[in-house]
Image: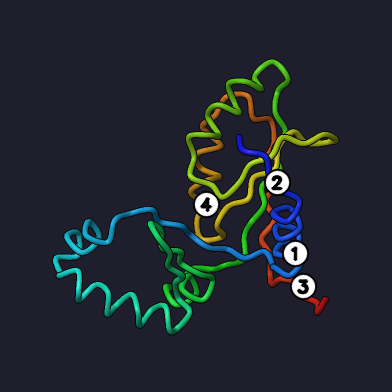
Amino acid sequence: MEALTKRSVQLLKLLYEKGKLTSLYSVHIKQSDLAKELGISRQALNLHLKKLRNLNYIRTGRGFIDVTEKGLNALGFSSTPAFIFIKVSPTKRSEVYGRIKEIKIQKAFRVTGDIDAILIVERDRLNEVLRKLSEIEGIKDTRSYVTIEPITWEG
């Protein structure tokens, strides 16, 4: 891995400090493939992408398209996640964590304390994820928490 220069680290830190955490979906697909999948020309696709970009539903760059929180909301998906706290049988941890990797979730963390893992899932997929977790041998307990809204502050 290439070492970062002092200026690069300074820039990265500034971007981090000025940034805010958001929910988005990144798609890495060629626009020609996307146009083909939609059954439209590249030119027509570009017009649609431009409109979505101007409405802040997506962000685009070389080789990627991000669906923003505003875009998720326009589709009827919640941008506020649900959290699942999991207690795992100590002898089954490896198997359980391997199976969790197969489930479509936003993030998963192993943690210390009274629980063994925290999963962050899309609120709209909570029931599906809980059903899949119930099929995994070695999960002793799950507790789910659905977020209401983010607490924001100006900083």
Front position in the image: 106 or 17: 17
* Quadrant of the frame with the C terminus: bottom right
Measured as percent of width and height from the top left, residue 102 is found at 48, 34
Residue drawn where x is 24% and y is 72% of the image: 45
- Find out whether the residues at labels 4 and 3 contact each other: C-beta distance under 8 Å: no
**As shown in the figure, which amino acid type bears the numbered disc 3?**
Ile
User: Circle 2 is placed at which residue position?
Assistant: 143
Mark nearest the camera among 4 and 3 is 3
CA gap, disc 1 and disc 3: 23 Å
Measured as percent of width and height from the top left, residue 109 is found at 69, 39
**As shown in the figure, which amino acid type bears the numbered disc 4?**
Asn
User: Circle 1 is placed at which residue position?
Assistant: 14
Mark nearest the camera among 1 and 3 is 1
CA gap, disc 4 and disc 1: 39 Å
- The answer to which of marks 4 and 1 sits earlier in the sequence is 1
* Mark 1 crowd level (few <14, some 14–19, many ≥20, 10 Å Cα): few
Residue drawn where x is 72% and y is 61% of the image: 16
Measured as percent of width and height from the top left, residue 25 is found at 48, 59
Colouring scheme, one of rainbow, by chain, secondary structure, one colour = rainbow
**As shown in the figure, which amino acid type bears the numbered disc 2?**
Arg
Q: Secondary structure at mark 2?
A: strand
User: Circle 4 is placed at which residue position?
Assistant: 127
- The answer to which of marks 2 and 4 sits earlier in the sequence is 4
- The answer to which of marks 4 and 3 sits earlier in the sequence is 4
Q: Residue furthest right?
A: 113
User: Circle 3 is placed at which residue position?
Assistant: 151
* Mark 2 crowd level (few <14, some 14–19, many ≥20, 10 Å Cα): few
Front position in the image: 80 or 26: 26
Q: Secondary structure at mark 4?
A: helix
